[in-house]
Image (tube, rainbow, N blue to C red):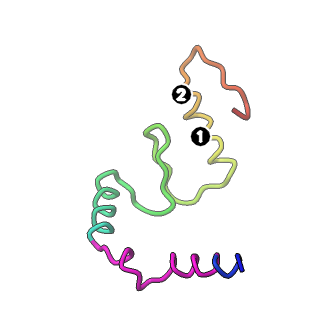
Amino acid sequence: MKSGRVIEQVRAATDRSAPALHQPHLVDAGSQEGNRLGVDGTPFFFINGHAISGGVGLAEFKELTDAALKEAAGPNMTLVPGQ
């Protein structure tokens, strides 16, 4: 049965005893990189070099991403909604 196979795959992917999940050097490297970049919490986003730390509402997030897109496009470009 196909759904049984999917369930087995999900269980295997989330098995905390799986060897792939026991790589503390990867966790340490990620933590060090986050510290170097100034990441101070979750969620944390970089958009065109601008940091957004912590949870923000959808309207504010959209406003920030739209501003970053406009900045990246430059003064002579027009953004087309939905693209």
Give the residues in magenta.
6-24
Report the amino acid beneath label 1: Thr
Q: Which residue in the protein does label 2 denote?
A: 71
Q: Identify the residue at horizontal 50%, vertical 50% (top origin).
A: 52
Q: Position of residue 21 (x, y in %)?
A: 39, 76
75 left or right, relative to 1: left
Report the amino acid beneath label 2: Glu
Prevailing secondary structure of the magenta residues:
helix
Q: Identify the residue at horizontal 47%, vertical 37% (top origin).
A: 48
The mark total stands at 2
> How busy is the neighbourhood of tag 1: few (under 14 within 10 Å), some, or many (20 plus)?
some
Q: Earlier in the sequence, mark 1 or mark 2?
A: 1
Q: Position of residue 37 (x, y in %)?
A: 33, 51
Q: Position of residue 74 (x, y in %)?
A: 54, 20
Q: Is residue 80 above or below residue 19?
A: above
Q: Identify the residue at horizontal 55%, vertical 24% (top origin).
A: 73
* Residue lying farthest to the top in this orientation: 76
Secondary structure beneath label 2: helix
2 left or right, relative to 10: right
Q: Which disc number belongs to residue 65?
A: 1
Secondary structure beneath label 1: helix
Q: Position of residue 65 (x, y in %)?
A: 59, 40
In magenta segment, residue 15: yes
Q: Quick one: quadrant of the N terminus?
A: bottom right
Who is closer to the viewer here, 41 or 26? 26
* Residue lying farthest to the front in this orientation: 1
Give the Cα distance between marks 1 and 2.
10 Å
Q: Which disc number belongs to residue 83?
A: none
Q: Identify the residue at horizontal 58%, vertical 77% (top origin).
A: 10
